[in-house]
Amino acid sequence: AYIFCNYDYARDLTKTRWKIEKGLHLRYMVNEASYFDALLSIALAQRTKEDEWQKHALECYEKVRRNIDVMPHRILIMETEMDVMMGQTKDAIGNYDKAINAAKESELIHEEAIANERAGDFCLSQGDVRASN
């Protein structure tokens, strides 16, 4: 649901997953979930302007950062998205490019696609219509 920008549905699914996961200790699943939770929380923080989503994004980011198996492009995407969330957009395009290239080097085309999509959405939000082509 996150990938298709259906943030309300993604939020509802995530909250349901949180209830199910209480007490579970699944390292891989927690890391994967925390990554997408961070991206969703950032999107919701930008959309709703609610502090709880910004706080949750930072918590998820820290969970992912603590994992030694984390993929560098994911850190780059999350850091860039958080910068944009905080209004620090000066280096966003360059940082999205770094994330795209890191995902490409890892041969993770689906992760590269997410980074490209986020970069395109950012460009559109800034009035840069080149991203719509």
Image (cartoon, rainbow, N blue to C red):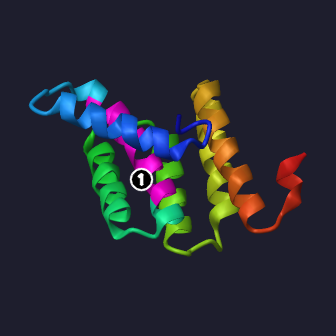
39 magenta-colored = yes
Give the answer, above or below, for where 74 lies relative to 95: above
Question: Residue 32 appears at what percent x and percent y?
Answer: 37, 31
Residue 36 figure quarter: top left
Question: Residue 57 appears at what percent x and percent y?
Answer: 36, 56
- 53 lies left or right of 8: left
Q: Is residue 68 visible?
A: no
Question: Residue 31 appears at what percent x and percent y?
Answer: 31, 34
Helix, strand or loop for the magenta stretch, by majority: helix
Q: Amino acid at mark 1?
A: Ser
Q: Which residue is mark 1?
A: 41
Which residue shows up at 51% across the image and 46% down it?
A: 7
Q: Nearer the viewer, residue 121 or 109?
A: 121
Give the answer, above or below, for where 114 lies relative to 25: below
Which residue shows up at 41% across the image and 53% down it?
A: 41
Residue 113 figure quarter: top right
Q: Residues within 10 Å of mark 1 (few under 14, many from 20)?
A: many
Image: magenta residue range: 30-44
Give the answer, above or below, for where 44 lies relative to 117: below
Q: Is residue 1 visible?
A: yes
Which residue shows up at 14% across the image and 27% down it?
A: 25
Question: Residue 30 appears at what percent x and percent y?
Answer: 27, 32
Q: Quadrant of the C terminus?
A: top right
Which residue shows up at 65% across the image and 32% down it?
A: 104
Q: Helix, strand or loop at disc 1? A: helix
110 magenta-colored = no
